[in-house]
Image (cartoon, rainbow, N blue to C red):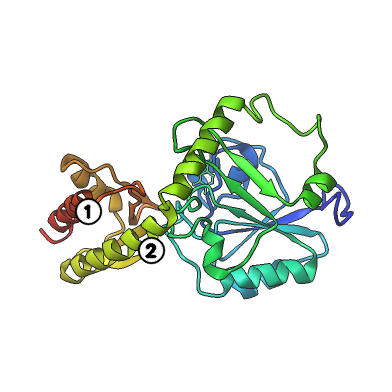
Amino acid sequence: GFKKKKIEDGKQQIIVFDGNFHGRTISVISFSSSKKYKEGFGPLTPGFVSVEFGNIEAVKKAITPNTCGILVEPFQGEGGMRIPPKGFLKGLRELADENDLLLVCDEIQVGMGRTGKKFCFEHEGIVPDGVILGKALSGGLVPLSVFITSAFIMDMVFSKGSDGSTFGGYPLACVAGTAALKVFEEEKLAEQSAKKGKILKQRIEAIAKRSPHVKEVRGKGLFIGIEVKDGNAMEFCRKLFKLGLIVNDSHGHTIRISPPLVINEEEMDFLVEQLEKVLVG
Ligand SMILES: Cc1ncc(COP(=O)(O)O)c(C=O)c1O
């Protein structure tokens, strides 16, 4: 905003979304909707305006002459495995174009095939101005995260030598990332995720129909959430752990089904059998 739109320094604003999770560093916890993430970490970073996830009208209303960008998780992972209404991402792209804003997608959790596409934003055929990737990018082994943008923005906003970090461009991590990308393409992991996720979601929906506990099943690819009626998903995760499955909750109320993209048929059967036990009995 400062460099591109010449907004007065200190007045820049970025639009973010209720229920967001962008990690644990100070600026991103500053606009968390969750008290537990920021309590005790003040003073917090100003300049973020949080609006309802999935509500394009709310975004429109939040734009001011000081707005320089929109930061969004295309699907919210920690926020309850939430998928926005169709057209939301496209709407963000249009608003960003109309108002000269940068649209940045945090794909750390949903990128690299998790939702059945290489990038989650592909579900709406948009291209953001910036993409943040990590975790699966290096096969989950060596810590690696990246910010990807166009050469135009890179040259305008960042300067060689001054924008860096101690481990930025760490060669071992980059080699691991390049190898993981090769496997990702060769084994068609995004396509695998789409195919397996469709089957798995159908099987989970069948369980949900027989279960007294399930409120809703949602997901795309191998990114599936099972929201439970009593809001205590961890209780089910603990039971699943005893049955041999490591499963986390999301936002307290949703069981997060996010298996490795290479999960095989036998493992999917095992997963479904255990879910049947804890959700139906
Ligand atoms: C969407 C999203 N962004 C960012 C992060 C990573 O943040 P950090 O490396 O600061 O823990 C996560 C971690 O789970 C995430 O899910």
Residue annotated with mark 2: 219
Residue annotated with mark 1: 265
Question: With 44 as the anchor, is 203 left or right in this view?
Answer: left
* Residue drawn at x 48%, y 59% as measured from the top left: 117
- The outermost residue toward the left is 281
Question: Is residue 6 in sight in this rendering?
Answer: yes
The local secondary structure at tag 2 comes to: strand
Give the mark nearer the N terminus: 2 vs 1: 2
Q: CA distance from mark 2 to mark 1?
A: 19 Å
Which kind of residue does numbered mark 1 sit on?
Glu
Question: With 96 as the anchor, is 276 left or right in this view?
Answer: left
Answer few, some or many: residues within 10 Å of disc 1's Cα (few below 14, many 20 plus, some between 14 and 19): few
Q: In the picture shown, does residue 181 fall above or below 60?
A: above
The image shows residue 139 at horizontal and vertical percentages of: 45, 38
The local secondary structure at tag 1 comes to: helix
- The outermost residue toward the front is 186
Q: How many marks?
A: 2
Question: Is residue 229 in sight in this rendering?
Answer: no
Which kind of residue does numbered mark 2 sit on?
Gly
* Residue drawn at x 56%, y 49% as measured from the top left: 32
* Residue drawn at x 64%, y 75% as measured from the top left: 57
Which quadrant would residue 62 be assigned to in this image?
Answer: bottom right
